[in-house]
Amino acid sequence: MRGLPWWNETVPVVLPHLDEAQAALLRSELAYQNHIAESAAYAALPRGPVHADLFRDNVMFDGEQLTGFFDFYFAGVDTWLFDLAVCLNDWCIDLSTGHHDAERAGAMLQAYGLERPLSAPERALLPALLRAGALRFWISRLWDYHLPREASMLKPHDPTHFERVLRGRILHPVSLSATV
């Protein structure tokens, strides 16, 4: 799984490939996420098995019927809130701009809450974890784009997509009252 330790190891490696504004954002957000991860509230978040990459293209449907999930390469144990944030950052945005779609997010959070309601600490940390999800995939895509590994199935994705998502999450934090 590509969690915080991997982010801390990888950021110095990808920084030389970025312009100054991108590098400043990456350093600043990594410092913020390290601060969040050291908090008591974060330590108390429920954890368990997570997919950690549950994007639209890793889910199968037959019409509107969910039929399966795949690509468990980065699955592991993490906070369930992080896994939810990763989903929200893909399923509940406009793909062309990365802008948050409050209607979709509200529907996803409402459905999620029917199965496992978010606690008050989870609700408070969701904006930070949305940023963490965007950061994780920005770093991962920067790594794959600038330092590709030999893999016949790997096609690097555009890293600027999650840079835009992260900037949006910072400038316009998601308010749960506006989505649920």
Image (cartoon, rainbow, N blue to C red):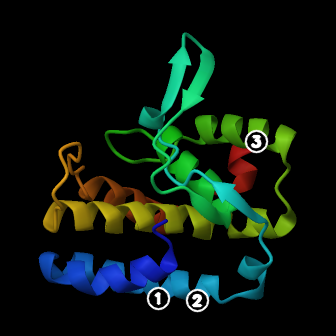
**Circle 1 crowding by C-alpha within 10 Å: few under 14, some 14–19, many from 20:** few
Please, what is the three-letter code of the amino acid marked with disc 3?
Tyr
Marked residue nearer the N-terminal end (2 or 3): 2
Residue identified by numbered label 2: 35
- Expressed as whole percent of the image width and height from the top left, the position of residue 110 reads 77, 39
Residue 91, relative to residue 25: is it above or below?
above
- Expressed as whole percent of the image width and height from the top left, the position of residue 116 reads 84, 47
Which one is in front, 62 or 125?
62
User: Which residue is rendered at x = 62% and y = 35% of the image?
Assistant: 103
Residue identified by numbered label 1: 31
- Expressed as whole percent of the image width and height from the top left, the position of residue 44 reads 80, 77
How many numbered callouts?
3
Q: CA distance from mark 2 to mark 1?
A: 6 Å
User: Which residue is rendered at x = 42% and y = 34% of the image?
Assistant: 57
Q: CA distance from mark 1 to mark 3?
A: 30 Å
Q: CA distance from mark 2 to mark 3?
A: 27 Å
Q: In this view, which residue lies farthest toward the top?
A: 63
Mark 3 lies on a secondary structure that is: helix
Mark 2 lies on a secondary structure that is: helix
Q: Do we see residue 29 in this rendering?
A: no
Q: Do we see residue 78 in this rendering?
A: yes
Q: Are marks 2 and 1 in contact (CB under 8 Å)?
A: yes
Please, what is the three-letter code of the amino acid marked with disc 1?
Ala
Residue 97, relative to residue 32: is it above or below?
above
- Expressed as whole percent of the image width and height from the top left, the position of residue 102 reads 60, 42
Residue identified by numbered label 3: 112
Q: Is residue 85 left or right of residue 98?
A: right
